[in-house]
Amino acid sequence: MKKLLLLVLVVSGGIVGYSYFLNAPPASADERVLADLERQFDSANQSMMQASRATGASGMDSTADIEAARTKVRRLESELQQLKPRLASDASRQRADSLEEKIRAFREATD
């Protein structure tokens, strides 16, 4: 019984340590906003791919879904342009540049 309890404690401690140290939230508010923009872009990109697949597979009209994803990405691009001057660390600026490049590629592929 003691071994089982010890095992449960070690496993739960490992899970808590993993989530705390490896998935730590960004330090500043601007970095949290950048992380949110990255998640929103991934979501819009996934919605666009899903709408494209639905159009190809079933022939359904998914123009509204595609346009919604494009609008979301345009909004994200303008928010990113406002955020970039406020970023303090080089790592954040590199992440912002990477996101900007992904947005540019998305827009070139969809426009």
Image (cartoon, rainbow, N blue to C red):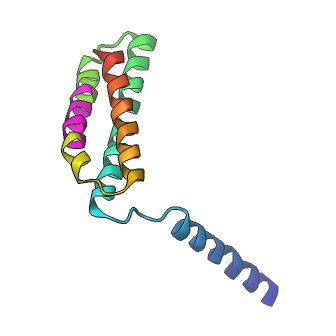
Image: 10 above or below 58 = below
Kindly give the residue lying farthest to the bottom in the view shown.
2
Q: Nearer the viewer, residue 61 or 30?
A: 30
Image: 94 above or below 15 = above
Q: Quadrant of the C terminus?
A: top left
Q: Quadrant of the N terminus?
A: bottom right
- Secondary structure mostly taken by the magenta-highlighted segment of the chain: helix
Residue 18 in the image: state x and y as whole percent. 59, 67
Residue at the spot 38% in from the left edge and 9% down from the top edge = 59
Residue at the spot 42% in from the left edge and 52% down from the top edge = 91
Q: Is residue 72 magenta?
A: yes
From this viewpoint, is residue 49 visible? yes
Residue 16 in the image: state x and y as whole percent. 57, 73
From this viewpoint, is residue 1 visible? no
Residue 8 in the image: state x and y as whole percent. 70, 78
Q: Can you tell which quarter of the image residue 5 is in?
A: bottom right
Q: Is residue 2 left or right of residue 82?
A: right
Q: Nearer the viewer, residue 65 or 84?
A: 84
Q: Can you tell which quarter of the image residue 60 is in?
A: top left
Residues in magenta, as a range: 70-80
Q: Can you tell which quarter of the image residue 81 is in?
A: top left
Q: Is residue 13 left or right of residue 24?
A: right
Image: 86 above or below 11 = above
Q: Is residue 16 magenta?
A: no
Residue at the spot 50% in from the left edge and 62% down from the top edge = 23
Residue at the spot 31% in from the left edge and 45% down from the top edge = 37
Q: Nearer the viewer, residue 78 or 19?
A: 78
